[in-house]
Image (cartoon, helix red, strand yellow):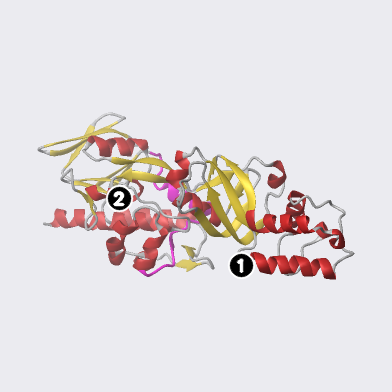
Amino acid sequence: MVLLEAAREPLGKVRISGGGRCNVTHACFDPAVLVQHYPRGHKALRGPFSRFQPRDTVAWFRRRGVTLKTEADGRMFPTTDDSATIVNCLVRAAADAGVQVETGAAVTAVSQDAQGFAVQLRAGGTLRGDRLLLATGSSPQGYRIAQSLGHTLAPPVPSLFTFNVPEPALRELAGVSVEPAQVTVKLPNQKPGQKPLSQTGPLLITHWGLSGPAVLKLSAWGARVLHDCGYRAIAQINWLPTQSPDSLRQILQQTKDDWGKRVIRAAAPPEISLPRRLWDYLGDRAQVPPDQRWADLSKIQLHRLLQELTQSQHAVAGKGVFKDEFVTCGGVSLPEVDFKTMSSRVCPGLYLAGEILDIDGITGGFNFQSAWTTGWLAGRAIATLADS
């Protein structure tokens, strides 16, 4: 078996994932729950996850001397906190299985005839084989090869991205985080009755706008509609989603009564646990002067402050890539693949695995898990044929 890798070193995405620590998988061991973390592909993955899921991933690495640990949010990393541990393990496993790894071996075209597949290399020469696995991720060349062999694609668009918010005062809060916050996106072309995009979770303000799990999850579920509107939308933020507007109104009114002589923007009430810089920023947006005291807070100002706490509006003017965790929504159409073996339904002898498929998950190790699962299924199917 020959593995062709276009890059000079294999597993580049594994090496840089998780900030160099490699978020191998997620501690979600119920397939029915696990599939809920995939905006696209959740139905197709239900069967595969019943055969190889995160528990199996953990066991696979443990058998090869690599122990994984679970962090508070469910993400799983090697105990070494070093992605090289995972890379080296996979490279050794390939060598032990007799796989010949050819790096710097970019493929320019693939054709099929009665004798099997002919794989043309950029450096020259042609390799032949009776079975071919495409695990090319979101590579445009991989998509072109799949199409040349008869497959159709769901148009690839970015998933897992941050929001570009061109608001200088917000960007000055870079580094401020809130957990949890609720982010809801209002689209310019949103149809009446259309369910809004909304996610709750940790939110991070950056020097370009908004990031953190809440935004990343929202971008994954809304990848295609956000693409269709040119990444122009309104992000509405509820900075205190665990409290109702009525309870917050009572807190503000009680604070006005109790803290009459204190300056409003100096600090938030204890019941409103927001970072001081964020509280001051929201007070400015609510048109509360820097030196105004609680006793002088008008009903109109109190209402505006409540609105900023629960329905703060921010114009999104584009997207940014989420560090090195770039993921693509779209790929090979799923009905064209047999998910028992990952074999093509339109091209005999062809197998597909990983992100080349129209499958993507939210951040947290879910995209790697779908790659491990589909790759495991394809490998077993190919090996079974080789032995028969």
Check disc 2 and report the residue beneath it.
Answer: 353
Residue in the foreground of this view, choosing between 302 and 155: 302
Q: Name which quarter of the figure residue 310 lies in.
A: bottom right
Asked whether, in this view, residue 184 is left or right of residue 54, the answer is right
Q: Residue 61, can we see it?
A: no
Q: Is residue 268 left or right of residue 102?
A: right
Residue 76 is situated, as x and y percent measured from the top left of the image, at: 47, 64
Residue appearing at x 36%, y 48% in the figure: 355
Q: At x 42% / y 64%, what residue is drawn? A: 66
In the rendered image, residue 359, in percent from the top left (x then y), is placed at 35, 51
Kindly report the distance in space between the C-alpha atoms of the residues bearing marks 2 and 1. Answer: 40 Å
Q: Quadrant of the C terminus?
A: bottom left
Looking at the rendering, the stretch of residues picked out in magenta corresponds to 7-30
Q: Is residue 23 magenta?
A: yes
Examine the rendered structure and indicate whether residue 34 appears above or below residue 329: below
Residue 114 in picture, x, y percent from top left: 9, 37
Residue at which label 1 appears: 242
Amino acid type indicated by mark 1: Thr
